[in-house]
Image: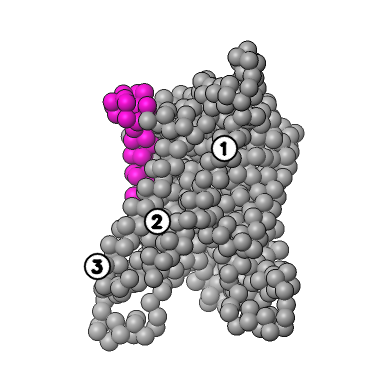
Amino acid sequence: MRIDAARGHAVPVAVVCLVILVLWYLAAIPMNAVVTQPKIDAAGGGLYNTLLFSWNHERPVLPAPHQVAQEIWKTVFMVAPWKVKSLVYHLWITLSSTLVGFVLGTLLGISLAIGIVHVGSLEKSLMPWIIASQTIPILAIAPMLIVVLGKTGLPDIFTKASISTYLCFFPVAIGMVKGLRSPDKLQLDLMRTYNASAAQVLWKLRFPAAMPFLFASLKVSVAIALTGAIVAELPTGAVSGIGARLLQGSYYGQTLQIWAALFVAAFAAATLVWLLGAFERMSWKRMGVKT
Amino acid sequence: MMRALITFTLLFIAAISSYFGFSLVEPLQGSYWLLSLIFVLLSWALAWAIGWVVDAVLAIMKAPIRLSNFLVPALFGLTIIIAWEYYVKGSHIPLVLLPAPTQIGAKFLSALPILGADFVQTILRAVIPGWLMGCGAGFLVALLCDRNDFLRRGLLPLGNLVAALPIVGVAPILVMWFGFDWPSKAAMVVVMTFFPMLINTLAGLNASGHMERDLMKSYGADWLTTLVKLRLPAAMPFIFNALKINSTLAMIGAIVAEFFGTPIVGMGFRMSTEVGRQGLDMVWSEILVAAIAGSTFYGLLTLSERAVTFWHPSYRK
């Protein structure tokens, strides 16, 4: 049954990816014409020369997929990971603040949710502000906040992580409030007949019941934590991290560098979400869910 | 009523005077962020306590729930703003770190023409057209996917993946392609809003029940009629969800894209240059504009959602 479902997606996804790849190669020809047309004409024109120059220009408007792959290969595997030229180094800088922010935000979100579920008046006074806190486009003002926070003398990694924390706590808090409230009256009554304390109800009933909600929220928040960390690296002067790579790339017209950084960031985001999915399945197993 | 008012006034005065007393303490050099943190936590705790008391008082007075739902958060916010003002003024926090609310307000009023120009450039030229185009495109592709199952099975996993990626990163590429002015910002907004709309619309189109769809079939309704009469109305809560998510994403996309190159007008441009010139009051005025615009946008969407999906359980009285 599950294998069938997987097969049901694999072929269409592959086809769509292939179509995107073909369109990408085709689009690279007219889009790069601005920079490549003189060279093509000089080489005598023709299909062969058009393709040769359109897909192999050094600073293309739209690099061909294989150029991006080459750039990633060059900067990830051919350079020692502690060198500034290595993308692994930049990815690590970004990931470390992402993870610090993610952990802090998750803890904050969970503790807020526990407070809200247990203390009635907290919900009334906090909930509107938790929601209002997200109407401010924090990502848009993140670079400014970084500059201001940087002047207070906090360690660099925490200033960057604070943006991720701010973004992370919201989905976790909302999801966990829902999750901690998901046990029904019957189960809560059973805990009462066991004479369970509030802490025991929380730990033995509410928390396990909230797990699916927690993981759904965590997947959302780890993705935005990475986005937050990247944007937090945009203020001028940042020298390391994926965001700094993007900014430098756009200043010096290094398209390949931008695309490579983008793809590596995308790969990191996908990996983080996948890892959380793996943890989720592990937690299912621990809790005896049959899949 | 009288007693409640007196209690509240007394508490309010106590809060203000305690802030004032605290703020007379000069911040310690070096470890002064720790002190700020304590102040922030204290003001939150105090504001929360006041909210709690007001809530209790209102409950005793049997005030209508709507009033207390509005009053408690409002007072909470007011207390924080007052605490902020006293803390900044009392501890002589430099303007480059954190301006006081009154300074921000003064700057906001004196810089209205500049703020207006930035608003037009960023919100009216980039955010709203981009949001309309992105949401429209996402919706149309979702309808296409709905007609063609192969396309749906191919695009949905990819869409889910892309929605989790740091899409803001394409901003430098779009600025390179569409130039420094607003078209690149609008394009950024389109890219950012497209996928959430696609995913949510697809989920919404599958939200109607089997029974209802079978009923439509027994009426002999074709795809279009089923879509318009049953499935689109059922999808509306999902579509509005996407519209709301996208309203925030659109603001972020437009402002972040301005960090990568812009003409000398726009909210993102203003914020990044004013930070460099240490004009933090101007930065906060722009944040205020963004917050007002964002909340208005969101509020309008909520109102129209209520009008369109009045049948949904969450709005039923």
- Of all residues, the one furthest to the top in this rendering is A42
* Mark toward the viewer: 1 or 3: 1
* Whole-percent x, y for residue B165 in the image: 48, 46
Using the image, tell me which numbered label, if any, was put on residue A253: none
The magenta stretch spans residue A4: no
Q: Is residue B85 left or right of residue B128?
A: left
Q: Looking at the image, do the residues carrying marks 1 and 2 touch, with CB atoms under 8 Å apart?
A: no
The amino acid at mark 1 is Trp
Q: Which residues are magenta?
A: A74-103
Q: Which of the chains bears the disc numbered 1?
A: A
Q: How far separated are the C-alphas under marks 1 and 3?
A: 45 Å
* Whole-percent x, y for residue B176 in the image: 61, 28
Q: Earlier in the sequence, mark 1 or mark 3?
A: 1
Q: Earlier in the sequence, mark 1 or mark 2?
A: 1
Can residue B194 be seen at all in this image of the molecule?
A: yes
- Quadrant of the rendering where the C terminus of chain A is positioned: bottom left
The residue under label 3 is A286
Q: Earlier in the sequence, mark 2 or mark 3?
A: 2
* Whole-percent x, y for residue B314 in the image: 59, 73
* Mark toward the viewer: 1 or 2: 1
Q: Looking at the image, do the residues carrying marks 2 and 3 touch, with CB atoms under 8 Å apart?
A: no
Query: Which residue is at 69% across, 63% downward?
Result: B303
Using the image, tell me which numbered label, if any, was put on residue A218: 2
The residue under label 1 is A24
- Local packing at callout 2 (Cα closer than 10 Å; few below 14, some 14-19, many 20+) is many
Marks 1 and 2 share the same chain: yes
